[in-house]
Structures are given as C-alpha cells and as structure tokens.
Image (cartoon, coloured by chain):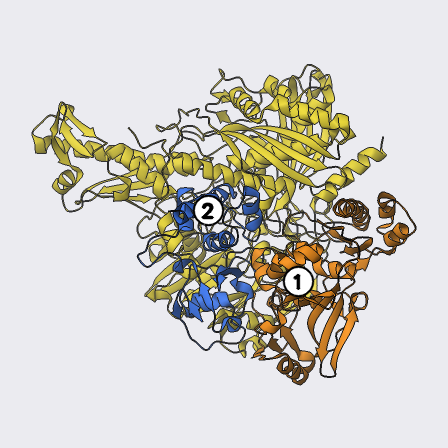
Chain colours: A blue, B yellow, C orange
Amino acid sequence: MTVNGTTVEAEVPDRTLLVHFLRDVAGLTATNVGCDTTSCGACTVLLDGQSVKSCTVLAAQVDGRQVTTLEGLADGDGEMHPVQRAFRAEHGLQCGFCTPGMVMATVSLLAENPRPTEEQVRTGLEGNLCRCTGYHNIVRAVLAAAADTEGQASR
Amino acid sequence: MSILGTRVVRVEDPRLLTAGGTYVDDVRVPELTRAARVTFVRSPFAHALITGIDPSAARAAPGVIAVLTYQDINDIPPPPPPPEGGPPPGSEAAPLPLGGVWQEPLLAVDRVRFVGEPVAIVLTDDSYQGEDAAELVSVDYEPLPTVIGIDSALAGQTLCFPDAGSNVAVTAAKPGDGPGFEACDVVVEHGIVNQRLAPVPMEGRAAAARWADGKLTVWVSSQNPQISRFVLAGAFGLDPDSIRVIVPDVGGGFGAKIAVDRDAIVVAWAARHTGRPLRWVETRSENLTGMTHGRAQRHRVKIGGTRDGRVLAYRVEVVQDTGAYPRMSGFLPFLTCLMAAGPYDIGHVETAARTVVTNTTPISAYRGAGRPEATAAIERAMDLFAHEIGMDPAEVRRRNLVPSDRFPHQSPCGAHYDSGDYVGGLDKALAGAGYPGLRAEQARRRERGDVVQLGIGVASYVEITAADADNGETARVVVNGDGTATVYTGSSSHGQGHETAWAMLVQSDLGIPIDKVTVLHGDTDLIPLATGTYASRSLQLGGVAVHKADLEIKDQARRLAADMMEASEADLELDTDRGLWHVRGDPGSGKTWADVAGRAGPEGLTASVHFTEAQPTFPFGTHVAVTEVDTETGKVRLVRHVTVDDAGIVVNPVLTEGQRHGGIAQGVAQALLEEMVYDADGNPLTGTLADYAAITATELPSFELLESETPTPINPLGVKGIGEAGTIGATPAVQNSVIDAVSHLGVRHIDMPTTPARVWAAIREARDSQ
Amino acid sequence: MIPAPFTYQRAGSVDEAISLAAQGGDDAKFLAGGHSLLPLMKLRLSVPEALIDIGPLRELSYVREDDGHIAVGALTCHHDVANSALLGSELPLLAYAAGQVGDPQIRHRGTIGGSLVHADPAGDLPAVILALDAALVARGPSGQREIAAGEFFQGLFETALEPGELLTEIRIPKPAQAGWSFQKFTKRAIDWAIVGAAVQGDRVALVHMGSTPLRASGVERALAEGAAPADAAAHASDGTSPPEDINADRGYREHLARVLVRRGLAEARSRA
C-alpha cells in the first residue's frame, strides 16, 4: 500500500488490522487505538481520501491503495494543513490522543462538505469521541478550517 | 503589558498536531527494544473462589514467553500493615487504600471480587499472540453469591471480606449546630442516586518497564510520576533511587490515573522478575471494567426552612459504593460531606456517610471526586424545596447564598471558603441566559400543551481545589547561559497545557519570551520530588511555585546585575517587555539574561521552590441549562448551557475555557447519558463503548461561558483551580432542567441519567397518579 | 480486540468468490466492507477460519434503473447509497436511511449487502427494504435466485441465504405512493435504533421490535380499512415481541413504536 505517498510493503499475518500495520510496520504512531468496538474514531485515517476507522479494516484489504495519516498532512515544506492550523488556533485539542483521528475525520468531512453548518460539523464528527475538549473548540476549529480553505481557494 | 490574562495558543500543539503525541504505546527507545507484550487474564466472575489455575495450554501457545500468577510473586515484601500514627483505618480523612482485612492483592490469590480482576499475566512476543494465549489459561472458579448494589451490601448476607465481618468499610457522621428540622415550617425529603460512571480517558491504562543493572525504569500513563515512584518502591521493597518513572504524553486521566494501580505494578514486577523489558496497553473493554469507576453514591437528602424561602436545615446521608476494594477508604464521601452545604448560608447541616464494598470495579477519583456528588445532592434539594414553597428556584438560591461581604466564610461543614461572589455569579448567569425570557417561553409552551416542553435548570456551586494544599508542589527554574529558561515542574500535565501556562509565568516574571522557555515534567530523574496533577491543584501550587522560583531568580539576578553594572540594587529595574536589566531612567544600559546568567557560572541561575498553601481554595459559579423534552418519547435535547465558573485570576483564557468546556461536557454526560450498569450477577452490561454511552458532539451545543474573576488571597497569583468546576456545576443544572421541563405534569424527581426511558416513565407515573 | 487467526483470500470475480466459498464450507465467510463482520470477529463472537474478500468486486457497486425497478449492487457502500442522485429522486427513503447508518467512517466502508446479510433487527436497512417490498438477488453454486424481502430475514442474524450464496443485488420496485418517512429513535445519534419505523406510502416496517425487521401489519390493515393514520398507528406494536435491554423494556418499545409510526405516517403524507 501507499502510505503518505510512500510505498510500504510487508508480509504480515492475515488478521493484521490496518491500524497496527500503520503503527508497527510503517512506524507511524500518530494514529491511535482508542476502543475495540469501532466506536471512538481515534484510529481514523484516509483511505483513497475517505475517512475510515483503521481498526476495522484489515491491512490486506488495503493492498494497492492509498492511505493518508496525520503525519502525511503537512505539505512538503512542513507547512501545516489548514485543518491542523485551525485546530491549533482554536485550541481544539488538549491531551491530543483523539486528535489525529479527529483531524483526519475533519479533512474528509470538509472534502465532502466544504461549507458545513455547525450542526453538520457535529453530526459529521459523531464517529469521533473526545473526552477533554467537550467538542466546543473542535467545532470552532472545523468551521475555521472551512473558512480558511475557502479563503485560500478564492485567492 | 503582562502576557498573563491574554489568549495564548499552546506551545504543545505543533508537535501533537503533526507528529502526534508519544503515549506509552508509542515510546520507541533502545531500552524497550524487543519488549515483550503483557496480556492480563481477568476474572469473568464478579465473586468467586479460585480453585485452580492451569497455564500449561497457554505456555505451549506460539510466542509465549511466560505465564505468571500470584504464586510467582515470591520476590517482593508483603504489603505493609496500615500506617501507625496516621489516621486510623476507618478514618474518613485517609485517601489511601484501607489495607488490612481489606487488602487488595496484585494478582488474585484464592478469590476474585469483581469482573475484570487480574488473575494472571501472559508474556508474548506480540500483542496478537497475547490475546490468543490468554484465552488458553485455564482458571477454575467456584462462583459465590454476589454483592451488587448498595442494598445488598448493607444487608450483609454475603460478605466480600469475611474477615472484616461487614461490607461497611468506613462510617462517619457530623451533627448539625443549633436548631434543626423541628424549627422548620417546611421539610422535604428525597432519595437521590449519583450513578456509577466510567472515566473513559481516550488513552486507557498503559505501562512499560525494564529492569537492568539494579535499576527499574517504568514508563506509565499516570498523573503522578513521583508518587508512582514511591508506590513502586514500597511495593517492591526497593530504594526509590533505584527506580525511575517516566510519564510521556498521557491521553487523559480525569483522576483515574492517579499514581499507579495494581495492574501497572504487576507489569513492573514482571519486568524485574523475568528480566525482560515489557509493555502493557489495555484494550477499551479491559479499561471499562479494569480502570476505576467514579461516583456511585446514594443520597438521602432532607431540607427544611421557612415558607418565604429561607433554608434553615439540611441533612445528607451518603452511602458510597466503593466497589470491590476500598482504594480510597472513606475519602470521597468525606469530601462530599465537607462540601455538603454548598455555597449556601445554612445554619444547621448534618452529614452521615458509609462506605460499602460490592463485587464491582473499585471506585476512585473521577473529575470532581466527591464534590459533584455534594453539589448534585443539595441542588436537587434546593429545587425540591423551591417547588414545595412555590418559589422560583433561582430566587430561592439567591435568598440563601452566602452574601459577598461575608468572606472568608466558615461553612457549617468545616470548610473555610476563601473568597467568593456567589450572588454576583448567579445574577450574571441568569442574565446571560436571559432567564425571564426563558421562563416566558416555558409558560407559553405549557399553555399551548406543546409536545416539546422547555426546561430551565439552575445550579449554584462552590468547590474545593488543592484539597491537599499542604502537600504543595515543586518547581525548579533555570536561566541558562544563552538566556533561555528551563522549568522543571512537579505538575504533571495530561492535556491541561501547563507547558504554555508556566512559560507565560516566566515571561511575565522575567521577560524571557515563551518560545525561549522549555517546561519539563514527568521524569523522576529530572524531578525527583513532587506531587503531580489532580484535585485541580496545578496552577495554584505548581504554577505559583514557578512564580516564586522566578522571584528568587530575579533576586539573584538583581545582585549580579548590580555588580556587573556597578549600580546599587535599588536602582536596577527589570524590563519584562524586553528581558533586560537596566538602571532606572537609563533604558540604554542593559544586561540581558544571557549576560547575567553567564556571570552566574556554567550552571546559570537556578532556584528551587516547594510551595504549599495555607489552605485549599474555593472556586464557585452558577450554571443555567436549557433543555427540550419530547413528552411523547422522553427524549431530551440540551439546547443551551450558560455558565459562570469563577476560579480567581485567569492566566490564559484559552486554557481556562478549554477546561470549562471539557468539564461541562462530562457533567452533562452524567446528567443525560452515561451510567455503568451491572446485572445482578455482577456482569457489566455497559462493558464496551458501543453500550457505555460516552457523549459525542451531536448531543452537545456550543457552550456560553461568562467571565468572572474573584481573586483568592491564599496565593500570590490569586488563582484557584478550574479543572473540575465545570463538571460540578453542569450535572445538577442539566438534571434540574429536565425535571423542570416536566414538573407541570407532576414530576418531582428523575434520577440520572435522564435517559428517554426514565423521563417517559416519570411522565407516565405522574400522569397515572393524578 | 484482535480476531482469532484466519486465512484471507481475495476473490477476483463473483464466480471465484462463490467457488472459494464452496471450498471453505461453513468455516468461510464473505468479507465486504467488514463493518458488520470484523467488529464481531474482533470480540471473537465470530470465528470464521477463512475470509473471502469480495470488497474489490467493483462490478457489484452500482445504482441504476433497470426495467422499471431500481437495482442497487450489494457492494454499494452506505455513503454512495445515501448520495445517489437516482435514489434521492426515486427512493429517498433508502437514500435517507443509508445516511443514518453508523457514522461517516462506517458509511465509507459498510455496504448495503453486508448490512442486509448481517440481518441485525436493530439495523436500519433491513426494515427499509422490507417497507420497499424489495427482492434480493443471490448467486450460489446452484445458480441465481430472487428472494422476497419478506422471506429474506429468518431470525436473529439469520437470513434465507444458503451457505456459499452471495447476495449480489437488491431490486426495488418504484413505489406506488411517493410519501416516505424514516423515524429512528436513539439515545445518541450514533446508537443503533432503540425503535425505528420505515414508511413508504401505506407500507410500514419496524426496526428493533423483534428478532427480525417486521411489517407493521396491524397498521397496514387499519389503513387499508380506511382508518386515519393516527388511529392506524395505535396498532403499531400488534403482533410484535420487542426485546428488552438497558435502553428500553417491552412496554417502552411498544409505546415508541406507536409514536414513531404515527409521526412517520404524518410525515409521509406531508411528502406525498
């Protein structure tokens, strides 16, 4: 599979979950495991640009496809992605554990709905749990990122 | 212009947002290369004798290095008897495990007392093998009758600890002063449940350990690296100097990661016992029954007063279900009783508390730790009283809040409230919510008989922060030869943003900009003595310690700079905007911090402080919650949540707001959704995140936070703690709001969580009884 | 957290999938999006020895009009079902309900076929296709057959599919009556329905009122006899045996069914 633009190849047991492939084989530990019932979203990554919960995808199912994790979001010069910038500006994270999944879910949400209302943001993040922030600033971050992307696109 | 009080985004975030945090499972250091994985074998029974453990099938499984049980734990001293000279074992003031007949083993010996209790561990090359092998460990259990629920514990037909002779571990009572209920025209009594919750930090428990060359290194997701080191030293009979505890990033704690628990101690023991580096990361299902739970109190409240709204007497009887082992003795109900009177000026307050054991997960601190329970009880009582006398609940509160000119105030329960403006907080919250307009809208909907009714809930609170003020906190500040500063703090951030806030303190005090300040925490080799983060103590103890260390450095620097500039100390000024020492009136003269620190010697300038407060501090506030209740289905929607949370001077509004938001969300969650439920056999029914209703973004609105800063005289920065206040105020406001929405239908009380089924049942019952 | 060991095979075609399944027998299962199966396997509630990955069979992902009915490929993911313009105009009940399944990440992976074959009575889509009078096309070693929705759901997590049969398509007739509604009652937005009602015209099906999705036949009969919708809704729980769990007892589910059907019928009529 291609992860953040780089081909990663390995032989792994058939039951290897994508999240463990990313963490232990590709060495990308930003993506976290937060539950065992596909509930929390901490493991969210992009599969061909769409958000998926990598704990409920077998690495084998992703053979030949493209995965993007948090580590792959910043551009080549290390410039933060608008969503990363917005999360920082709006204090959309505290302990940081849900953050990689939350950011990737946001990227996917905005790709499908570039100008969401607050309600659409909240519903759009229903698959991502956070215990620290109460979601208030996460919602602000998503709306700010939407406005920022719009602003950038119109330049 | 001081940076304090200004909005500063966090210095922690670029790393967390790009590379991600480094939690225990992410630590990649040479010492943990080829660390084996630990998988626990846990009891599926709530109460049973263990009649045999057969590890042979597991030992033969692929990748298995060892299978260990209590029988292998032959190389550490037995647990010490309860401390002499300290508080007696039954004392409500001792937050330590009771021990003695209530002793909790590391791995179960001959009996298990809760589903999830650790029985054995399997060491494997990788975690997948560990899960396979753990299934193969054969344990023979002889189930015993279970003690589930407070009534069962009190009935005592089955004892969790036969040698204790009772399921009641701690008892305490405090009578009230002066005339009691007999002097009241109106008396209302009610039973209230403050339900069991699971803390659910997004990162569960995790620990890694390595024993090499006579030294034990432990990486652990904890709120207290230094206390953990002493706990481990005591458990193993080792000199603390031979133990290093490293706390990397921690994915949330909320009180449930105070120090280290038996599972982490087992991991550390096993690393020493086998000589293999080990790593353990629990699954969420393990976490929901293995990590301590919170709350689980039952209350009987009695409130009395006059018909014109004056509360004269209040009584709360607390029964604390502490789960299978009394890990915090009677400490949580002690705090509940200490804060029982809330922010009210009530002459006669009686409290009584019992702590019972049951065959469920042990209870420990969870955001608020005993104080949300106190507030929830009296806030329900105030509403019941208000309803009884037909007075607006906000007005009843106003008539009973301690007036603002009466501080410091000694509460009838023995707490010394330092400063407060309770009435001001109430008025501000009501104004911010548009209270009269809300009542008008409620009246309109009632008149029309709308299906969706409006509820308005008010909760006023006061809370105790830095309850262990005399433990204090440590700080060592170093100004390096290059003019940068390094802060070694005893505080142990797990999301709070201390690195940013402490850097701001240094910038404010010394004029060294925050991007030149490095804040270190979490490594006992760097910071051997400290208490850590819980009880909302960090800013007022850890932050003030940094501030005081700054002032000591300033004194040292002044002497050096005076010498360097051949001026008298009295003529010297530190320009904190530029970080420059200069002679007053001559801004051109100047020595930088690099100059002065360089003059001090190769170590730069350094100051170490252990700061204690004379007493805890008491933040306060009022929350107003607005809910809509669908009276046909019972479904509740939180529409608005307005708060005043006054924790004294605000150092960084960004951080303070974040703590309030997070606290409010968890408080709302208790009122509306979350509950750890067990069946009669002690099986958890909410043992996964599919069933435990952790709150999501769709159930919450954006919050409306109002500003209020009433300084405390207790520390030089005038700061109190904000970490738990939001939770304490939010829960009763929302609960009261839901009941308020349907009170016109005859509903008096609904226990939490106010799920649709509960609300509908309450509506139906009220209708049927009319 | 981790499934028990199994062997993974990838099918290059529908025929290959069927032949691999025949070889694997009872111990083999098809893997589509994996969001019904893998969660069970991770908790080790399901321990198949072989998984046949049919996810790559893009030829089974489609939404098209076919001969007067709408054909939805079994491997169409919920996200695509929810966003299909064709479904939005012809079968908005299905499009809307698919958008209610789980959360966005789950909808990117979970498929309509996977959901239907999983046959969880608390699932949204089984009741919807029951209300829509769909036919399910299955292909197996002995060929292809059509199974009416009313016969497809046999019991708790049990369908009429024979071992080794692969669901390939869901065929839905264009509804005779345009009004529709999907009433999903939950505690939290991401929860499974405590109770749900799918309404298409005068056809009503219930979510989580038994071990399978159920037609609310009492309601449909009353409507056919000319009852007003609000009165017909009073029959919503007739003949049902709703489960009891931590969210609801029997009485509450029965009550919710009546309320949701009443609201669903009203909303459907407002859309007609």
- The N terminus of chain B sits in image quarter: top left
For label 1, the SS is: strand
* Chain of the residue under label 1: B
Q: Residue B49, labelled with which disc?
A: 1
Crowding near the residue tagged with mark 1, few <14, some 14–19, many ≥20 C-alpha atoms within 10 Å:
some
Which is nearer the eye, C165 or C187?
C165
Q: Position of residue B31 (x, y in %)?
A: 35, 65
Distance from the alpha carbon under mark 2 to that under mark 1? 59 Å
Residue at image location 88% in from the left, 53% down from the top: C218
Q: Position of residue B333 (x, y in %)?
A: 59, 37
Which residue position is annotated with label 2?
A: A146
* Looking at the image, residue B649 lies above or below residue A106: above
Q: Amino acid at mark 2?
A: Ala
Q: Residue C110, labelled with which disc?
A: none
Q: Amino acid at mark 1?
A: Leu
Judge left or right: residue B713 versus residue B262: left
In front: mark 2 or mark 1?
2
